[in-house]
Every structure is written in C-alpha cells, then in structure tokens.
Amino acid sequence: MKIIHCYLKKNRDKSVANRHPWVFSGAIHKIVDEDGAGAGAEVRVLTYEGKFLARGFYSPDSQIRCRLLRWQDKPIDRAFLGKKIRQAVALRADFMRQGDTAWRVINSEGDGLPGLVVDRYADVLVVQIMTAGMEQRKEMICEILENELSPAVIYEKSDGIIRSEEGLAAHAAALKGELPREGVEISENGLRYMVDIAGGQKTGFYLDQRDNRALIAGLARGKRVLNCFSYSGGFTLSALKGGAERVISVDSSRSALKLAQRNCELNGFTCAEDDFVVTDVFQYLRDVESSFDLIILDPPALAKHKRDVESAARAYKDVNLHALKLLQGGGLLLSCSCSRHVSPDLFQKILFSAASDAGKTVRILAERAHAPDHPIDIYHPESRYLHAFLLQVVES
C-alpha cells in the first residue's frame, strides 16, 4: 500500500495530539511521498522528530492537507471504515423517534469520517463525498452502506465549497437504483413530506432542524406565524400541526414554495394561495404591515468563508431587527444561523444589537443546535455550525 509521510513543524503537533482531525498546510514541515501516492492517499502524520501521531487522508490541493481518522498506527482499510459506519448506524438507532423515516446516517467529523456525509430518506441513501480520500474509497463505502442498510437507491450528490477546494468537480448520479420521479416521501414528527433529492437544496431536506421543528409545533397554537426562508415548508407544517391560526411562508424560490404547498396538501392542511409569498425575505420584512406572534428565521449560510463574517453579521442583524419590529409583547422569534464561521457568541451579540436597534426588550428563552443525528466531535468544535436562539419580546 502506498503511503505518504507528513512531518509537522516543531511545536505544531499539539492539536493533532489532542485529536483535532485537521492538519493545515502552515503546520507542515515536509511531505515525503516516495511512491507518488498523491491526492487521497493514506498519510501518516509525524512530529518533527518522526514520532507517530495519527493517520488520515492527504489533500494537496486544500489548505487542510490532512484529514485524520485514526490515532493508532494501523491502516484505514475496509474493516476500519466498516466499523465506523456500523457505529454511526447504531447511534441513530438509539436516538431516532419511532415513525421517523429520515435522518443523517453519517455526519463527517462528528462520526470520525471526515469528508463523508450520508442522509437517509426512507429507502434512499444520499451520499456526499467531499474529499479526495473519500472519493478514492467511494465504491467501498457504498458497498458497506448497502450491506448495513439495504437501501433501494444510493444517490450521490457531491458538491460544495469543500469539494471544490479539494480539486474535485461536482458530481450527482444514482450509484444504485433510480430516484422516483415524483420525489421521495418521508415521515418526521408525525408529518409527511415530499423531498426533492436531485433538485432540492443540500441533500433535499434540512434534517438538522428536526428538533427545532418539533419545538415550533409546541409553541404555535393560536398564533399568527411567519416562516421566513421557508424552503419546502418544514417549519410551516410544524406550526400548522401545532394549531397555528395562520402561517405565512416566504422564500425567493418559487419551486420551493410549490413543494411547500404540496406538503401542506399531503397532510390535509388548507392554506390560501397568498399564504405562500415568493419574494426576497429582507425586503418583505421591511414592507409587510402585518404583525405576528411567532417568526422563524432560518436563512441559508450567509458566511461561507471566514472573510464573509463581517458582511454576514450585517445581514443577520438586518433580518433580525426587522423581524423583531413585527412582534408585539409576548411574541416569539426563533432565529437561526447555519454559518459555521459565525460563533454562538457572535450570533448572540448580533441578536443583542438587533434588539437594541429595534427598541425592544428581549429575553432568551432557549439556545438550540442540531439534532442528535448530527453529532459534534468534542475535539473539533468547528463541526458545530447550527446555532439557534428562541427569543421573546417582553411586554412594556
């Protein structure tokens, strides 16, 4: 087996010794690739003096040159990958609600498999391969998944910034079976959803918001609800299930709102045509004259790179400020950020600033994150990306 040796600079080995799974280019003293193994090959990471630290996969085109999987000097072979995948599957068996048919099976670093994400939608597995190391082992990974989960369809939907930084082109195709033309129906929290895997955002549905959707169902009774960046209606259906008086769903995508309408009909909810508004959310919040009792803000990632944080902070403040202005005393706001470069502390400060400028007295009722099928490696806090605060406007 061809293997690369990566020697770290002096005094740059602490994070690897502490089990952080990334080695950045700036920490590397030298790379020894005598066999010409190249991108995706297995790499042994060593101290400057040559003491073994960890094993992983090598990515010469990325600033993250090594993504680490083992802190034992043993190969990352089929047996190891099979063990990690089985552990991930077993974890979900402990946490998933009876009746739910969609969840994240593998959450990259959170399951000790950096560069690999697998989501399950009924009998369809959607695989995201984000690194050269996982790309080389894609066939092996899919064979293991098939043996463990027996899906009818395995669909690859590999795209995004991480993959492009690895020098890999986007790729989407069925690896086993064929996606149903009408979409895939799933169940979550007692609701039915049609998921557009091939044409939808991410892998088709925002599974990480499962528990926050359940929270909204418990808060919505009798309330006038505004669901911003509503996509296919996850929070909309949850509010309707919880007994909301009315739910307005706003998104810039007409096709997403058509799917949201379809999902409402699938669950027997009667909604007016003007309950679904195709427009820019930022402008809508400025222009709308109605007031609401409960608002959900779940925008797409506004800071995809570290350099975007300042502009993202302004955008988050703007959208939250105008949402808070639409809430009367006792009104609730669930405000979310899925930008991993925006820390929970920074996001809370942005919300503080928005509340101050809105002239509202606001308190935090809860701080939320992703559901347990999106585990976070304690040594890798960067994998925590979803931050959500449940706020209440206090009556004067």
Image: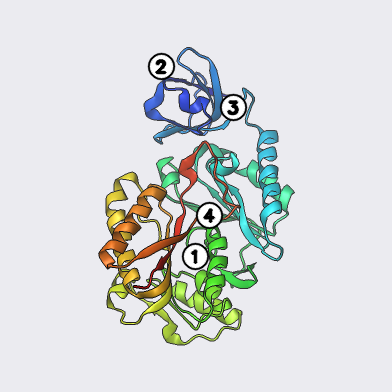
- Helix, strand or loop under label 1: loop
Q: Quadrant of the N terminus?
A: top right
- How many angstroms separate mark 4 from mark 3 (CA)? 27 Å
Residue most toward the front? 396
Are the residues flagged by discs 3 and 1 in contact, CB closer than 8 Å?
Answer: no
Compared with residue 183, is residue 372 higher up or lower down, i.e. above or below? above
| Residue 87, quarter of picture | top right
Q: Which residue is rendered at x = 70% and y = 38% of the image?
A: 83
Give the amino acid at mark 3.
Answer: Trp
Q: Which residue is mark 1?
A: 199
Q: Secondary structure at mark 4?
A: loop
Mark seen at residue 71: 3
Amino acid type indicated by mark 4? His
Q: Give the amino acid at mark 1.
A: Gly
Determine which residue is flagged by label 4: 370
Q: Nearer the viewer, mark 1 or mark 4?
A: 4
Q: Position of residue 314 (x, y in %)?
A: 27, 57
**Residue 366 in view:** yes
